[in-house]
Amino acid sequence: MFVHINDKQFEAKPGERLIDVARKNHAHIGYFCGANGICQTCYVKVLEGMHLLSPLDDREKAMLSDRLIDEGIRVACLTTLEKLGTVKLLTTVEEVKRMVEKKPQEIIPYQAKMGWESLVKFPETIAMQAQRFSTGKLETWQLVTDIAGAVAGALELVVMAVQGSLGWGKKTKAFTREYVPAATDGNESTKEHPDKKKAEKKTSPEIDTSLKQHKHAPVN
């Protein structure tokens, strides 16, 4: 099956999480918590193929407001591919990026909307995360390790982007230096390079002394 993320097509298979498909293909998606369902940065908007995905579970319902659900928003680290077909996604971080580039006037209303929807679900989100910690479903050390891995992955993407923009890694023509062989017979005279002889033959024409301007000659 194919998953289109931010207009780029990738191969995938049932059972994979959306976040895993995005990360392995270096798609532009947020995952600061290392795909542990905490940071809420891996939101994606499902443009096509919602019926091919796993249904909303209690954790997603605790984080997503009814308005976001109606808009087709899913949490990528909590959503898996269940059926064969084509799924098209737009990550929220890519949506913001495009908005900044093309419609910057829409940024403030968009951020206000997302902030309000998160605030509405904040009590449920906190309660759900606390329960995960208390029941041992979320280990602190594993969380720290996953966050470190997420940061490393983000830095890798940054390096790749910088290298691409600067053109690093492209092959350049090797520099070669030509040397004129020196005489080895110990004599003062050496064999001169042909180009040097040609250069010596080219001399500037002699200027008649009457045409030369004296240092202090007045200029009319």
Image (cartoon, grey):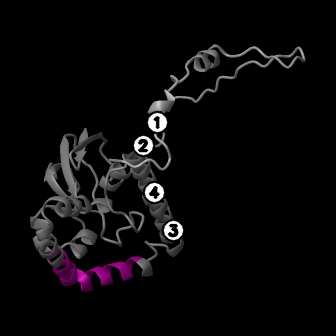
Q: Earlier in the sequence, mark 4 or mark 1?
A: 4
At 59% from the left and 20% from the top, the residue drawn is 199
Return the residue at label 2.
167
Q: Earlier in the sequence, mark 3 or mark 4?
A: 3
Measure how far apart labels 3 and 4 are at the Cα level. 16 Å
Residue extending farthest bottom:
123
Return the residue at label 3.
142
Return the residue at label 4.
153
**Place of residue 209 in the rendered image (x, y in percent of width and height, measured from the top left):** 51, 30
Q: Amino acid at mark 1?
A: Lys
Q: Looking at the picture, does residue 42 appear above or below residue 108? A: above
* Foreground label between 4 and 1: 1
Residue 138 found in image quarter: bottom left
- Residue 121 belongs to magenta span: yes
Q: Amino acid at mark 4?
A: Gly
Q: Looking at the picture, does residue 153 appear above or below residue 61? A: above
Measure how far apart labels 4 and 2 are at the Cα level. 21 Å
Q: Secondary structure at mark 3?
A: helix
Q: Secondary structure at mark 2?
A: loop
Q: Are marks 1 and 2 in contact (CB under 8 Å)?
A: yes
**Place of residue 18 in the rendered image (x, y in percent of width and height, measured from the top left):** 30, 53
Q: Secondary structure at mark 1?
A: loop
At 46% from the left and 64% from the top, the residue drawn is 151
Please tell me how crowded label 1 is: few (under 14), some (14-19), or many (20+) other residues with Cα within 10 Å: few
Q: Which residues are magenta?
A: 113-132
Q: Amino acid at mark 2?
A: Gly
Return the residue at label 1.
170
Quadrant including the N terminus? top left
Q: Secondary structure at mark 4?
A: helix
